[in-house]
Amino acid sequence: MPTSAEIRARARASLSGKWTPAVLHFLLYYVVIFAIGLFSLIPFIGWIASLLLTGALTYGVMAFYLALSRGEIASTETLFSGFSRFVETFVLSLLVGIFTLLWSLLLIIPGIIAALSYSQAYFILKDNPGIGGLEAIRRSKALMVGHKGRLFVLYLTFIGWFLLAGITFGIGYLWLAPYIYTSLGHFYNDLINRSASVSPPPSPYGNDPYAGIIV
């Protein structure tokens, strides 16, 4: 299995010659998120708008850097592609938020483990247009069995870069974020290349799609 250093090296190779569009598109994403954050200050209406838009925007930014990691064309259209799958991305965002919160209520560590388990859901949703948010979560949990520690270590290797980016009054994050997202894309690519299928094992709960989802 590739080490964190090898995954980051692959990300840098993917970004070579493409840093400008990678940074500018993340800046665009950040501006949109910042605007939504300001709008969310409006009682109730702003909160609802933020809830509705988060899933589509998260899907779009993940799809953009996944495309970069695969040497594909990543455009502004890719960045906002989540709105073409609005229902699925909204459901995915809502369920991931709820399930992670429920695990976090137990202890911090179960919450972190849950977040790692669901981490591939947006990538899976992108690669499988015919599935919904719930199925993407199930497949992510199956795909991450035995790999949560690897992803956690990958995140830890960026701590030094976070500190350095902070010295630049946050400007460095415009370069760091594409680096991280592209690395996550390569991590996912490695997972699916090593897995014969990302389909989940048969459910012991029968045909009920909601039974046992957070177990």
Image (cartoon, helix red, strand yellow):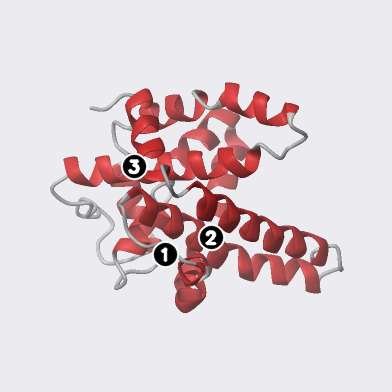
| Residue 172 pos. (x, y %) | 66, 36
Q: CA distance from mark 1 to mark 3?
A: 22 Å
Most distant residue in the front direction: 17
Q: Residue at x 29, y 73 (%)?
A: 130
Most distant residue in the bottom direction: 84
Q: Residues within 10 Å of mark 1 (few under 14, many from 20)?
A: many
The residue wearing badge 3 is: 186
The image quarter containing residue 9 is top left
- Foreground residue, 133 or 192? 192
Q: Residues within 10 Å of mark 2 (few under 14, many from 20)?
A: many
Q: Residue at x 37, y 57 (%)?
A: 67
Q: Residue at x 17, y 51 (%)?
A: 197
Query: Mark 1 or mark 3: which comes first in sequence?
Result: 1
The residue wearing badge 1 is: 133
Q: In the picture shown, does residue 27 fall above or below 161?
A: below
Q: Answer with left or right where residue 28 lies relative to residue 116.
A: right
| Residue 184 pos. (x, y %) | 41, 42
The amino acid type of the residue labelled 1 equals Gly
The image quarter containing residue 73 is bottom left
The amino acid type of the residue labelled 3 equals His
Q: In the picture shown, does residue 32 fall above or below 164?
A: below
| Residue 100 pos. (x, y %) | 54, 46
| Residue 55 pos. (x, y %) | 55, 63
> Residue 93, labelled with which disc?
2
